[in-house]
Amino acid sequence: MLRSSHILFGLVSSPAARRRLRLAACAALAGLLSTQAQAQDSTLTRLVHKYQYDLVQNGNQFSGPGWEKLQQDIQQSTLVLIGEGHGMAQVPQFTAAVAAVLKPKVYVAEIDKYQARYLSRMADQPGLPTAFMRQHPNGLSFYSWAEEFELARTLRAQRAAIVGIDQVSLTATGTFFGTLADQVKNRRTRAYLLGRAAAYQAQDRAIMKGDTGQYSLFVQRPSALDSLRLLTRRESPVARQMVEDFAASAEIYRLFSVSGVRSHAMRVGLMKRNLLTELQPYQPTGQPLPPMLFKFGAVHAGRGISVLGDYYDVGNMALNLADVHDQKSLHIFIIGKQGTQVGGFDPDDFAKNVAPYSADPQSPFVAATPAGAAWQVFDLRPLRRALLRDKLTVSNAELEATILGYDYVVIIPETTASRNF
């Protein structure tokens, strides 16, 4: 196109004529690009609507053509990954319905392994962990919310093991130090750790209430971490490993203020190593993977390269694990169109945590979801095939990552924020 334009310009002797021709050529090129963009938009819109299905929610029960398609693929998959928008009450309800179909032996959660053990014990007991939550607000991260805790209880009733693979949570430092104190034998060390647990709990609670300052994990000095190692050097391997886990988490948080991308990559690497370690008891050598359900923030659960940087996240590792065993992974992205979601961590006044929510209206999936109607399910695999065969071009990087990384998008027309106990 450009080469032929240059030749054409060379045959025109008048400068004014050349300018007019350049303007005409630019206008023609702009018109062509506009036509191509409209054609691509039309192709995208056509594919989105062609592979769009209704899903009807009734509590934890789902029905409709969208649910039928999801059920069929869940039944054919070993690993099912749900990439979510956090803090929406409908997501754990949907996850419980997926679990009823998949019947997972392992549930992989975006919490640390120590929180996962607390969560498993509490979910196995009758009643709600109200007393624990008063003492350790947000100590179970997302599972401090009522709907998420009920999901954990449902999974435990199905005999699924709850596995946490994340770094130590910002909101659980006090709980962590209390757990560490239980692992040490030296009475003075234990007393010191319990004192630290109370101090960190008070500091972090003030941050949750909206006071200025930083969570205790953000301000761990290298000298303090070295002192903690020295203090526990003669304790059990379990206690020493806890200290190393805490130090690695503190480094991730420290690095976040310097380079968010590097910090996130370090966190993802930690989660992948933890996943391999935590899966060992549930996968004998040489045996296929057991059915596993993952629920993480949407940025983590897709296949392929991460939209946040030049690395591969947990979702891609799950795909690789399934491939190695000739099994299948299924990746589902679920988010709301509008409504409310959790937007804070106030432990005393939950009303302060409810925030209005609205998804990007430019998203073709959001735009195709009528307000107040049934949930919508979009099968992305035909879009992905068109994209990989150059029959579809997507200029938005996040949209492209979604199409390449997920098999389905589920849009909730109206969300409500998850609740505290």
Image: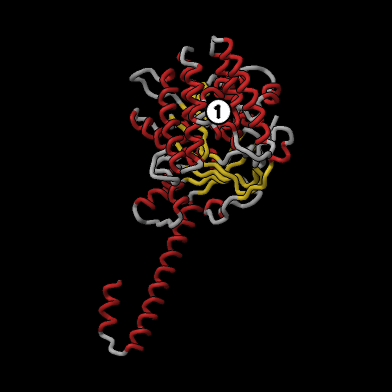
- Residue 36 in the image: above or below residue 9: above
Count up the numbered dots: 1
Q: Residue at x 25, y 79 (%)?
A: 7
Question: Residue 114: horizontal and vertical position, in percent?
Answer: 54, 22
Question: Residue 63: horizontal and vertical position, in percent?
Answer: 59, 38
In the image shown, does 349 or 325 lie closer to the viewer? Answer: 349
Q: Residue at x 46, y 20 (%)?
A: 241
> Where's the C terminus, which quadrant?
top right
In the image shown, does 215 or 109 lie closer to the viewer? Answer: 215
- Residue 361 in the image: above or below residue 15: above
The image quadrant that residue 418 belongs to is top right
- Residue 280 in the image: above or below residue 148: above
- Residue 309 in the image: above or below residue 177: below
Question: Does the rendering let one see residue 103?
Answer: no
Q: Residue at x 67, y 41 (%)?
A: 416
**Image side of residue 61 versus residue 234, left or right:** right
Question: Does the rendering let one see residue 162?
Answer: yes
Q: How is the image coloured?
A: secondary structure
Q: Amino acid at mark 1?
A: Ala
Question: Residue 382: horizontal and vertical position, in percent?
Answer: 42, 48
In the image shown, does 62 or 104 lie closer to the viewer? Answer: 104
Q: Which residue is mark 1?
A: 100
**Image side of residue 205 versus residue 45, left or right:** right
Secondary element type, mark 1: helix
Question: Residue 325: horizontal and vertical position, in percent?
Answer: 35, 27
**Image side of residue 265 versus residue 54, left or right:** left
Label 1 Cα crowd, 10 Å radius (few <14 / some 14-19 / many 20+)? some
> Where's the N terminus, which quadrant?
bottom left
